[in-house]
Image: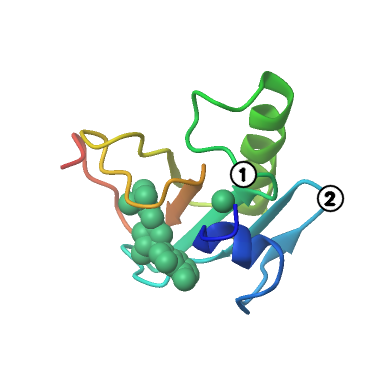
Amino acid sequence: MTDCIFCKIANHDIPVKVVFEDDLCLAFPDINPQAPTHLLVIPKQHFANVTQAGDSLLGHVLKAAAGIAEKSLPGGFRIVINTGEDGGQTVDHLHLHLLGGRDMKWPPG
Ligand code: AMP
Ligand code: ZN
């Protein structure tokens, strides 16, 4: 997708601080952090949202996020996938938010 900002980040056309990268996914800091640690984990391939990607890729990006969290957030963390308008999704390229470094509230807003 040529006009998708996360595709541009995945292709390294827009520079970000890469926290983790492999063949299938990339993790980088959210530009508007909501917690001391707030990373986005995206598949390199474009999928509009979580309903569009297959089991294997979803498992891969989830394990990538959990692996980063396991190393860097021993106190716990939250992984969020906002989906659609009601879910608060603003970028239509599947992404996992990895949040940590503070006490998380429940229910989320
Ligand atoms: P969502 O609202 O769940 O779709 O999340 C999109 C997230 O992408 C928001 O938290 C934004 O702050 C973040 N974001 C948008 N553009 C960029 C960018 N260029 N670099 C890093 N994060 C971004
Ligand atoms: Zn995209």
Helix, strand or loop under label 2: loop
Q: Above or below — where is 82 with respect to 19?
A: above
Residue at image location 60% in from the left, 50% down from the top? 42
Q: Above or below — where is 61 with respect to 68?
A: above
Q: Which mark is residue 23?
A: 2
Residue at image location 50% in from the left, 46% down from the top? 93
Q: Which mark is residue 46?
A: 1
Front in this rendered view, residue 32 or 11: 11
Q: Above or below — where is 35 with respect to 47?
A: below
Quick check: is the Cβ at mark 1 less than 8 Å away from ligand 2? yes
Front in this rendered view, residue 2 or 94: 2
Crowdedness near tag 1: few (<14), some (14–19) or many (≥20) residues, C-alpha within 10 Å: some
Helix, strand or loop under label 1: loop
Q: Position of residue 88 (x, y in %)?
A: 25, 43
Position of 108 with respect to 18 (left or right) is left
Q: Position of residue 43 (x, y in %)?
A: 65, 46
Q: Earlier in the sequence, mark 1 or mark 2?
A: 2
Given the image, on which type of amino acid does mark 2 rest? Asp
Q: Position of residue 20 (x, y in %)?
A: 71, 61
Going by the picture, which residue comes out furthest to the top? 55
Q: Is residue 55 visible?
A: yes
Residue at image location 62% in from the left, 77% down from the top? 17
